[in-house]
């Protein structure tokens, strides 16, 4: 017997179809109701699947399928479809009873529209689960050299619903909470029983349901005219068969099916990174050709975002299993008052008697000395707990809420997690909040990057793609749950022992975490939905810790000054100091904070993704093979992460390289890449000879063997980035009325700030040169701030005070910004 627990993806388009909307213009009021219902429905849907395989015997004489228990199917319709099967797969899928109760509640109260919407959502969810199971079974059958039929369900088309009982007799349906009534109807109603046939003489269906074989000729979802194709995908060790509808975009198809295609722009034809190898020649447009080398075309390498599926395809997706360099340091935390919000109390309660008529809840409240609330779920469990423990209990309290009640002898430790959600990476810190000691640190790449390297690309995805926000949220929640599972398994901790998560990130990431729309963050006047500290039951967001546990997001300042910046200020202690300090967290949107205990000024500079290796011809993230340092006085002139063959340039390597250009006169102060002749008399010939004409333009060739070079456009990208940051620093200094000599320290926070060569940063003018000796690299200050907020309620309160003490400067509203920006683009220390 096999059990599955697929995560559900509710497809808005399918929900609308179940509501009867096909190609009609849908009223905005309906769209809003559907969006809200989809977001709400996830917490009521509890999907479970049980299935198993059974050998089947075809009795040709009686035209009957004989099952191992002696039962059989005799109706011609189902026998004719399954008689060539070597075995049958029987499955029952359910969404649980909660969603059914929700639907009944709306219909009973007279809110018919909401009832219909939630009913359509349920049907969509069942459809998604059945397709997911079929795809997995199809891959398994393919690996055995067999085919699989479409799905068949008793009660559909020409198959009598009474045969549903025969399926139930073969499966452990009670384990997933499903039963049959006397009319052979399933309870919960939002359940589905299915049969598939598998065998060598079966041709795999193109989908789990073939409309051409269905009797419902007037079905509004019928699509017999549509064509489907098989896309065989190889991705590292993963082999996958994907069914594609005629005209589907290959990039979107791969992403939708969990294949991580490297890209920077979210499939918008801008970055040229989403290369795949195909087995057939494909039309190449002029726009795509700009991104492809001659070798790419010879090897049938194509950009997946340009390919429309119109035939069966074999696709190889380049797989990079190298680990990214993710900064997770949490050393040198400031000394804080250890005051976690979670506390366990061991109580020997007086037993009830005729003289002591207090209820169980009141008895606990009197013992802990506060008027604490308790959830409905925990309240229901209280009688059994009191009986089993004989009123000797361990009561876990969070603030003014009881979150756990158990046996007094329970030795369970209390754990919490601090999490820093970056645009590129996620860092998770597990702490014992009974003792305040660190247990472990885990990290991973943020898999949202498949929707674009920067937040704007991802926000655009949520705006332009149906159900885009839910998809991005699901990827984030799944990644967090995977990290939690990994860290719990390694440290032999049950996830129910985790009672709190404190989360920080930029404003967009926190909105994604809570599944809140970001559309206004991307458009003037750039107003987020919220900036205050938020807290929710983690299970309401789909995060797998103790069901009564909480997630707390630290406060944010503005659309582009997030809780990660507030957390960095908290851990750096700059808000307490008399001297003025400057904090920089450099990335696509670079946060800049200047001030002291008397007040803080902050702005965000739209630096673009150049310092993260994106938007650069040979750029890449900080993974093995990335050139991380360049020094023309060394041989070789570069060093790579992992000391392996170079594959491209990451941010710190780009800064070193441009600093070398400034130092050796490879560029002039405007950033122009000079010709070999212009620089040869002033600089080393070995360096000058790297300036060549290549692919129709002047480039600096860093590594001929691996085809790594820098173009004029790349230099301009760095100029735009450093110009924006330097302009932001100067404007904040002017707001405070100070000069560079008034700044005591410059804190470089975050991964890029930790790995960058400070001398190189000053050389290119990323910061004023006079400040280079004042730089202190403080590591993952955001993660440290999240840890402080986890371990001390006082620190969490301080974070809100910091937010209120920051004056945010919107650079686009400053009249002098453009002038400062243009000035900041010059390389003032150039030899030319």
Image (spheres, rainbow, N blue to C red):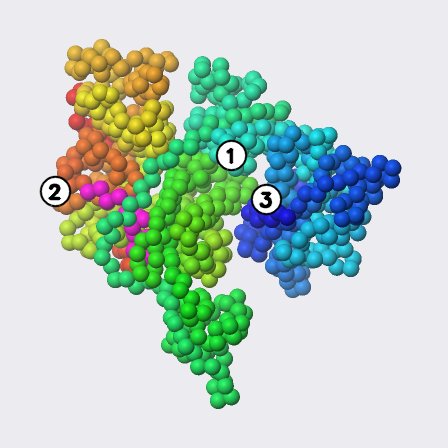
Which of the two discs, 3 and 2, labels the residue nearer the N terminus? 3
Image-quadrant location for residue 423: top left
In the picture, the disc for residue 11 is: 3
Q: Main secondary structure of the magenta part?
A: helix
- Is 531 part of what is drawn in magenta? no
Q: How many other residues sit within 10 Å of disc 2, few (<14), some (14-19) or many (≥20)?
A: few
Looking at the rendering, the stretch of residues picked out in magenta corresponds to: 776-791
Residue 686 vs residue 430: left or right?
left
In the picture, the disc for residue 741 is: 2
* Residue 203 spot, x, y in % from top left: 71, 30
Q: How many other residues sit within 10 Å of disc 3, few (<14), some (14-19) or many (≥20)?
A: some
Task: Identify the residue at the far right of this view.
Answer: 61
Which of the two discs, 1 and 2, labels the residue nearer the N terminus? 1
Residue at 38%, 70% (x, y): give it: 345
The residue that label 1 is drawn on is 259
Q: Secondary structure at mark 1?
A: loop
Pick the residue in front: 277 or 617: 277
> Could one spot residue 559 in this view of the protein?
no
Q: Secondary structure at mark 3?
A: loop
In the picture, the disc for residue 802 is: none
* Residue 224 spot, x, y in % from top left: 72, 33
Residue 292 vs residue 561: left or right?
right
* Residue 783 spot, x, y in % from top left: 32, 49
Pick the residue in front: 220 or 362: 362
Residue at 45%, 66% (x, y): give it: 404
Distance from Cα at disc 1 to Cα at disc 2: 52 Å
457, above or below 314, in the image? below
Residue at 55%, 41% (x, y): give it: 466
Residue 299 vs residue 115: left or right?
left
């Amino acid at each position: 017997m096999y059990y599955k627990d697929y995560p559900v993806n509710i497809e808005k388009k399918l929900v609308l179809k179940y509501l009867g909307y096909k190609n009609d213009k849908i009223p905005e009021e309906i769209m809003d109701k559907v969006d809200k219902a989809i977001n709400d429905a996830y917490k009521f849907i509890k999907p479970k699947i049980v299935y198993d395989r059974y050998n089947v015997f075809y009795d040709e004489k009686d035209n009957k399928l004989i099952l191992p228990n002696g039962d059989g199917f005799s109706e011609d319709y189902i026998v004719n479809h399954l008689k060539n099967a070597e075995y049958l797969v029987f499955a029952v899928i359910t969404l649980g009873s909660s969603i059914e109760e929700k639907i009944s509640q709306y219909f009973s109260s007279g809110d018919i529209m909401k009832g219909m919407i939630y009913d359509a959502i349920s049907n969509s969810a069942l459809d998604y689960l059945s397709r997911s199971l079929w795809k997995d079974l199809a891959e398994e059958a393919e690996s055995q050299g067999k085919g699989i039929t479409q799905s068949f369900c008793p009660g559909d088309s020409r198959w009598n619903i009474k045969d549903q009982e025969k399926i139930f007799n073969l499966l452990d349906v009670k384990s997933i909470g499903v039963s049959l009534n006397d009319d052979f109807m399933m309870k919960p109603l939002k359940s589905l029983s299915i049969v598939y046939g598998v065998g060598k003489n079966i041709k795999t269906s193109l989908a789990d349901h073939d409309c051409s074989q269905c009797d419902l000729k007037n079905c509004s979802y019928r699509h017999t005219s549509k064509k489907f194709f098989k896309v065989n995908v190889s991705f590292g060790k993963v082999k996958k068969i994907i069914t594609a509808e005629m005209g589907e975009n290959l990039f979107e198809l791969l992403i939708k099916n969990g294949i991580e295609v490297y890209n920077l722009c979210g499939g918008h034809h801008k970055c040229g990174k989403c290369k795949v190898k195909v087995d057939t020649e494909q039309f190449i447009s002029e726009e795509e050709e700009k991104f492809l080398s001659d070798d790419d075309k010879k090897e049938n390498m194509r950009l997946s975002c340009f390919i429309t599926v119109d035939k069966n395809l074999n696709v190889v997706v380049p797989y990079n299993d190298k680990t990214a360099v993710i900064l997770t340091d949490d050393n040198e935390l400031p000394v804080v008052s250890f005051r976690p919000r979670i506390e366990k109390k061991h109580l020997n309660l007086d037993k009830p008697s005729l003289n002591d008529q207090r209820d169980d809840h009141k008895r606990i409240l009197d013992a802990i000395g506060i008027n604490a609330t308790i959830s409905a779920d925990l309240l229901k469990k209280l009688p059994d707990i009191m009986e089993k423990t004989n009123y000797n209990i361990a009561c876990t309290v969070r603030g003014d809420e009881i979150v756990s009640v158990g046996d007094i002898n329970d030795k369970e430790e209390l754990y919490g997690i601090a999490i820093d959600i970056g645009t590129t990476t996620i860092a998770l810190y597990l702490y014992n909040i009974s003792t305040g000691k660190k247990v472990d640190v885990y990290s991973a790449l943020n898999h949202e990057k498949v929707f674009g390297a920067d937040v704007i690309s991802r926000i655009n995805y949520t705006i332009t793609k149906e159900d885009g926000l839910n998809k991005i949220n699901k990827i984030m929640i799944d990644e967090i749950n995977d990290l939690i599972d990994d860290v719990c398994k390694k440290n032999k901790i049950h996830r129910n022992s985790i009672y709190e998560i404190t989360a920080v990130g930029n404003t967009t990431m926190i909105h994604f975490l809570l599944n809140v729309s970001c559309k206004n963050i991307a458009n003037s006047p750039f107003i987020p939905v919220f900036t205050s500290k938020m807290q929710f039951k983690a299970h309401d967001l789909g995060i797998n810790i103790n069901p009564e546990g909480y997630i707390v997001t630290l406060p944010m300042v503005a659309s582009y000054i997030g809780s990660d910046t507030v957390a960095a200020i908290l851990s750096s202690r700059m808000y307490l100091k008399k001297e003025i300090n400057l904090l920089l967290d450099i990335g696509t949107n670079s946060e800049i904070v200047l001030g002291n205990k008397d007040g803080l000024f902050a702005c965000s500079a739209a630096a673009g993704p150049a310092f993260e290796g994106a938007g650069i011809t040979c750029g890449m993230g900080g993974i093995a093979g990335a050139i991380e340092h360049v020094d023309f006085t060394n041989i070789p002139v570069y060093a790579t992460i992992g000391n392996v063959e170079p594959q491209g340039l990451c941010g710190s390597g780009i800064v070193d390289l441009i600093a070398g250009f400034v130092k050796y006169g490879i560029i002039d102060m405007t950033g122009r890449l000079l010709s070999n002749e212009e620089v040869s008399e002033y600089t080393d010939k070995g360096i000058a000879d790297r300036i060549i004409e290549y692919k129709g333009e002047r480039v600096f060739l860093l590594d001929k063997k691996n085809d790594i070079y820098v173009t004029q456009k790349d230099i301009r990208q760095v100029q735009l980035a450093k110009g924006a940051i330097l302009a932001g620093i100067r404007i904040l200094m002017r707001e405070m009325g100070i000069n560079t000599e008034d700044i005591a320290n410059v804190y470089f926070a975050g991964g890029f700030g930790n790995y960058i060569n400070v001398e190189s940063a000053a050389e290119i003018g990323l910061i004023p040169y006079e400040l280079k000796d004042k730089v202190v690299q403080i590591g993952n200050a955001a993660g440290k701030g999240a840890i402080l907020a986890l371990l001390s309620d006082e620190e969490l309160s301080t974070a809100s005070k910091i937010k209120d003490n920051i004056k945010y400067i919107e650079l686009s509203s400053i009249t002098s910004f453009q002038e400062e920006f243009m000035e900041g683009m010059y390389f003032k220390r150039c030899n030319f």
